[in-house]
Amino acid sequence: MSGRTRMALCAAAATLMASCALLPLVSPVTWLLQAIFLLAIQTGVGMATRRVPLARPVTVAAQALVALMLLTLTFANQQAIVGVIPGPEAFAHFADLLQSGADDVSRYSIPAPLSDGIRLMLIGGVLIIGLAVDTLAVTFRSAAPAGLPLLALYSVAAGLSDGGADWLWFLVAAMGYLMLLLAEGRDRLSQWGRVFGGAPRTPGEEPSGAVAPVRTGRRIGVVALGIALAVPLALPSMNGGLLDAAGAGVGSGSGNGGTISAVNPLVSLRDSLNVDEDREVLSLKTNSADVSNLYLRIVSLDDFDGTTWQPSKRSIEAVPDKFPTPFGLGADVKRAEVETTVSAADWYAQNWLPMPYPPSAVDISGNWRYEPLGMTVVGDRRQTTRGATYTVRSLDVQPTADQLAGAPEPPAALKREFTKLPDSLPGVVGRTARKVTDGATSHYEQAVKLQEYFSLTGGFQYDTDVKVGSGPEAIARFLRDKEGFCVHFSFAMAAMARSLDIPARVAVGFAPGTPQGDGSVSVGLRDAHAWPELYFEGVGWTRFEPTPTRGSVPSYTQADTPGSTLPDVARPSQSTSTDPSATPSTSESCAGQNPELCASESPEAAVAVGGDGPRWYVLLAWALGGAAALLIPSAPMLWRLRTRSVRLGAHGRAEADIPLHTLSIWQELTDTAWDFGIPPDDSQTPRKTAARIVRLGHLDPPAAASVHRVADAVEQVLYAPVPHATAGLADDVRRVRSDLRSRAAWTAGLRALLLPRSSVRVAWAVSDWWVAVKRRAAAARPTLRRPSTSGRQG
């Protein structure tokens, strides 16, 4: 087997071994079998084109073309010409799959289901990394830089995984990279001598043949892989969907078809409430006698870290024919079943299904999944509500004030989970909650007093122009300024309820809409709303309405509660008015400027709750990560520029400085030739090396004369009794480099600048240093000698 063939196989194996780090991210792992097959074909094409041989750029282009055709055959054969030739329709299909994959990545937690989009991202990524490794290590014969794409592949996997078995996948990737380095060392040794071994380490020490590349490759790998471990630690972490660690949510995590994570579930509340034209989002037809309580709930936000409220990670399953009874709802609580038919606008594309809460059944076509704990329905495989019509049967739960006031303590696990508050929450939140609810004899009375405080007695004003803010101080600022909209009121009441040991979360959806003449109910953008839900054992999750002039006050909070000042009439939603706002918002209206923007799921429902921007250490982490991303790929070029400047720069005038300077000039000359594809040969004399550089580099006469002039100076330094300085050697090297650059192809010139071959000397220097350290350590250890047996009788 030739050296190139061995290198190609090792490059493919190293890519696949690094790809194993992606296995925990997706289930099932059958995608790896496809990746192995396609990568084998791509590698075979490279081996064949190099055997012809073809020019290096042609080899890379042929491999890339074959990889594209393989991906087309696998993922877009119906849209391609003859099944393998990609055209505009195939590329459009690729774009749709990649978008679908990106949506799935943000939607599912680890392990995500193997959708077509995710499968394209995985297999396409492996082929791209494999092509990069093969190009660097085999086509351009430089295995050390090939560690960068392998590092990128491992870093992506390590950044996404939960860290449980990262060490195992790191060892697998490390073995692949070391194998690649050792294969290159053997290949170089077979061609032009001991490159990795260097000179004997001590006088009289014999070269150790192939052992030197093995040892040195191992040391190089240790250094490079150490960097691979350190770089992901220095980069800032990412959160959300697949980018979150698995198991962070409250759900069991054992549902069929994966799990669902924190997704932005609703169009931006602030922009929706400030639109110039209240566009209809949903049209309802219901058999409920009182539509003032018909809230459409999309999702609940129950994970509060002091900065944001967001949905926890939940397991999802197939939508059941009949939903189970809501958790905590007792048999003695009055209820009535309501049937509601919902028609979504053609432009409204929401991944979560707006439904009255609690739902007991839903009839809808398409790809939908069910999340049991939150009793929500979410679209699968890019399914949205755009133009959908569906029927929901739900329960109109009607608890009494006595039932809520007499509710026993909730289960310990639920209370622990839904009363968690971060240490960063300002103390004024808890103090205000205790002051407002002073004298209350039950959690129910505390909840009613909190609702009254925000909606009536606290002096709060409803204002959609107030910025949401971000950081732990946002709630404290809202309590001080007493201006905000539903996000502020619901988030503040939920946090204050938790401070009183009342389980609480925030629901996001739509307030009751406007009844129409034909008996339907129109729900518009301005009905977008958020409200708190508090848990009472025997009743379950119960809605409260702290936002003034919005929605309707629940009837069970208007009972004969001592000291209650709540009116007896439900308040109509502000959205019942069709008149434009008297104080238009300064923010852009998604509906007014571009209706399609309102159809996306991108705006924030999990709105930040605190300071006025990212914290300084987050910005610093991103800045350091960006600097590292720029500096690491450019490190070989920067090292080479610095080394050239030192070697060709000024030097001492003393007689002892002449040999050192001349030898530095000579090394710079040979390294320059090496960068342009003329590898060094330490077995030859300076004169023969100079002739070899002139011949292989096709140098013009002035440059050839410069090479020989430097070689003569080196021989004079090595063999003359008294070395003499030779003027102009630095200019000779610059002349040679200029001639080599002018004769090289632009790709070779770019390679010599960005990834110079001679930069491998850094790894050699580190290897030599490590050998010296080990020798000093060994010399410092006491040696235990075995007692002599020469005087004993046999």
Image (cartoon, helix red, strand yellow):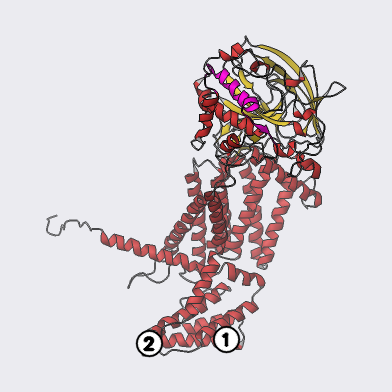
Whether residue 372 appears in this view of the structure is no
Examine the image and state in which quarter residue 745 appears: bottom right
Is 688 situated left or right of 701 in this image?
Answer: left
Mark 1 nearby-residue class (10 Å; few <14, some 14–19, many ≥20): many
Other residues around mark 2 within 10 Å, as few (<14) / some (14–19) / many (≥20): few
The segment highlighted magenta reads: 437-464
Under mark 1, the amino acid is Ala
Q: Is residue 606 above or below residue 284?
A: below
**What x and y, as percent, mark residue 299?**
66, 30
Query: Disc 1 marks which residue?
Result: 704
Q: Looking at the rendered structure, which numbered label has been put on residue 16?
A: none
Local SS, label 2: loop
Q: CA distance from mark 1 to mark 2?
A: 28 Å
Magenta stretch containing residue 448, yes or no? yes
Find residue 76 and report its horizontal and vertical position in percent.
Answer: 76, 46
Residue on which disc 2 sits: 655
Q: Nearer the viewer, mark 1 or mark 2?
A: 2
Q: Report the front residue among 14 and 540.
A: 540
Count how many numbered circles sit on residues in the image. 2
Residue sitting at 38 percent across and 86 percent down? Answer: 654
Where in the figure is residue 208, as x and y percent of width and height? 39, 66
Kindly indicate whether the residue at mark 2 contacts the one at mark 1 (C-beta within 8 angstroms): no
Q: What amino acid is at disc 2?
A: Glu
Judge from the rendering whether residue 360 lies leftward or rightward of residue 138; answer left or right: right
Q: Position of residue 16 (x, y in %)?
A: 57, 50
Left or right, residue 219 beside residue 47: left
Asked if 687 appears above or below 129 in the picture, the reply is below
